[in-house]
Image: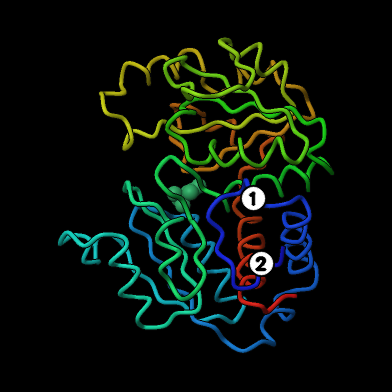
Amino acid sequence: MSFLGKSLLELKSLTNSDIQSVFDWASQIELKGWDIITKNPARLIALVFLEPSTRTTMSFEIAALRSGFKITKLNAETSSTKKGETVLDTLLTINAMSPDLFIVRHGTTEKLSEIALQLSCPLINAGEGVSGHPTQGLLDAYTIIKEKKSLENQKVLIIGDVSHSRVASSHFELLSKLGAEVAICGPTSWYPTSQTHKTFDSLEAGLKWCTVCMALRIQKERHRTEASEIEDQVVKRFQLNQSTLKYLSGDALIMHPGPFNRGVEITDDVLQDPRSVIWKQVRNGVFVRAALMAQILGVLK
Ligand code: CP
């Protein structure tokens, strides 16, 4: 498919060639510079973040500005969602002002896949509840491919609070499609209810098995009950630290989508480990998001 004028709401429906076109353009922007986009007429992008975000919002904003696009921003604290307005009505209101593209994050029960049908321009899902975070999935896959040449035969271990993670949901959609085997490791109460992946109760066994390990923070904002007891379990049994990393092979990758809670799922020294590509994930996110926005807006064809 062409991304031109289309929304990105999930990853399941993308073909391998769709995904490859995003990665190819991301790589071209990184290699040849932003000029390949900025020659084109400016478009207006509405960044609507109704849940907190640092890296997703900043990388979309930086990618948009580097690409020569104009942006306008709305966040939860300053929006009329504080007065009870729904996500649908928020987006319909902005839609009436004719942006060229929406970038939206929210955590309500409303569905972007339904809302997008009522909008006059495309929408990129920038993280929706626990259901998905497609651009994080794409940038993580891009990072693994850059480091390992391919996702074929990679064994990716997702560690920690899997059931509350929209990042994990997108990884389940994407990584197997691109040839990787995905397994999960963490407290069993945080395994997704309907999942068919290999599981590891022991971090040692999981780290010995994988070629890529990805730690997740405890998503306390999505827990119905107090998470502190399970947090203790994560620290004692599932924490990435110098002691547990001895089970990971020398050429494996250490990843984390962020934000991280140092001293809980990951320790300071792991961030400095030569196998860590955590800051590269952040950097790659700018190129992947630029490639996606530019294709959707018809600037890169
Ligand atoms: N990975 C991620 O979505 O981080 P932010 O919540 O900071 O955007």
User: Does 236 sit above or below residue 134?
Assistant: above
Residue at image point 38% right, 71% down: 73
Q: Which mark is residue 265?
A: none
> Which quarter of the rendering shows the N terminus?
bottom right
Q: Position of residue 106 (x, y in %)?
A: 36, 53
Is residue 42 shown above or below 122? below
227 above or below 61? above
Point out residue 256 in the picture as x, y percentages from the top left corner.
Answer: 57, 38
Q: Quadrant of residue 117?
A: bottom left
Q: What's the residue type where badge 2 is placed? A: Phe
27 relative to 37 in the view: left or right:
right
Q: Residues under labels 2 and 1: Cα distance?
A: 12 Å
Where is residue 261? Give x, y as percent. 43, 35
Circle 1 SS class: loop
First in residue order: circle 2 vs circle 1:
2
Disc sitting over residue 3 in the figure: 2
Which of the 4 quarters of the picture holds residue 232? top left
**Which residue lies most toward the left here?**
83
- Closer to the camera in the image, 105 or 265: 105
Nearer to the camera, 160 or 276: 160
Tell me the kind of residue under disc 1.
Ser
Q: Is residue 157 left or right of residue 216?
A: right
Residue 157 point in image, percent of width and height: 64, 26
Residue under label 1, please give it: 13
The residue under the point 50% across, 24% down is 194
Classed neighbour count for the residue bearing mark 2: other residues with Cα under 10 Å, few (<14), some (14–19), many (≥20): many
The quadrant the C terminus occupies is bottom right
The yes-or-no answer for disc 1 within 8 Å of ligand 1 is no
